[in-house]
Image (tube, rainbow, N blue to C red):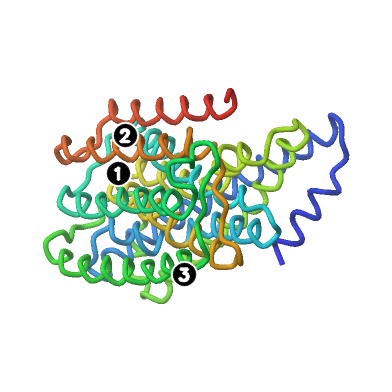
Amino acid sequence: MFDFFIPTLIDTIPAGPGGFFILLVIILVSLWLLGKGADMLVDEAVLLSERWGVPEMIIGATVVSLGTTLPEVTVSVMSALNGAPGLAMGNAVGSIICDTGLILGVSALIRPLPFKKEVINRQGWIQLGAGVLLVATAFIFGHGTASFTHGGRIPRFVGIIYLGLLVLYIMMTIRTGKQAGSDTNHEVTDLSVPADKMQDSTIIILLKMLFGMFLVVFSSKMLIPAVQEFAVRLHIPETIIAATLVAFGTSLPELMTGITSARKGHGDLAIGNVMGADILNVLIVVGASAAVTPGGLEVGVSFFRLLFPAMLFILCVFKCSVLFSNKFLKRPVGFVLLAAYVVVTVLSYLL
């Protein structure tokens, strides 16, 4: 319903300064709803972590990231079905760049993010491996060494394999998280979470999380068509729209969740959400989009020349930062990640 009603409403907005003002109002309202939803989502996710005895990072990498990745899944699958595979692929890759560069960068600049190294290390290898798997698949099933001039492809059956790997990833993450839970349990010290919330049942906590996710996803779906309309009126190419503007719009749930988590001192939740979202962008966003497309997803030349190298670079910077950091992802790391994101975004428009 939202996928039909909201874009249809956006299409009725007139051209000219008045239309741009209306789009601006939609964007501001969407951002306000995003903030409210992210606030609720983070508070309830922390409580759920305590209730289940699972580390916050695991909750962020599974439950929260599944909820906040829904906009990317919706946009990419609908784009693939509507014959715009460039938008689907660009959205997934651009979201990984945005999640790791912009979101973790901004979150670390706001406040150094505490993390548990052994848990982050394990998830980090999966995160980097997912990025490498995506590039390797597009290269192998595309034009091989000619991919830099002819592009590549993600076949339909590979998309189905990705979805199978998604199930294995979630099962493995939850199992290892429960095993680590007994060693990482801690008290919720955030004063912004009222004491009476600790009395809520698990069902109430889950319902509040779902409502927070709904606010985040709904506001994102309001924002995405408005951002796209801006880009279309400025005659920006589809692939660049997907890898920058749409990727930023669909990454807003992770951005707001990351900023809120950092502000409230839950670094594990912020990092886990981003890492989980990056993995899900490959396994479910690309996987589902390729699975519903008979010919698979075509991967344009721009991915091999710019977007894939940029994605792998940012993932490697983050991985190295974790390896050489001790308990905190500090502000200098945040600056490097954010700078890398800005450079990639600028190059996307210039090239």
Q: Is residue 110 left or right of residue 26?
A: left
Q: What's the residue at 40%, 51% (across, down)?
A: 278
Query: Against 112, is 41 above or below?
Result: below
Residue 160 is labelled as 3
Foreground: disc 3 or disc 2: 3
Q: Residues within 10 Å of mark 1 (few under 14, many from 20)?
A: some
Residue bearing the label numbered 1: 265
Mark 1–mark 3 Cα distance, whole angstroms, equals: 38 Å
Task: Report whether residue 208 is seen.
Answer: no
Residue bearing the label numbered 2: 111
Q: Residues within 10 Å of mark 3 (few under 14, many from 20)?
A: many
Who comes first in sequence, dot 3 or dot 2?
2
Query: Against 334, is 88 above or below?
Result: below
Callout 3 amino acid: Ile
Q: Secondary structure at mark 1?
A: loop
Residue 70 locus on image (x, y percent): 53, 60
Q: Secondary structure at mark 3?
A: helix
Who comes first in sequence, dot 1 or dot 3?
3
Callout 2 amino acid: Arg
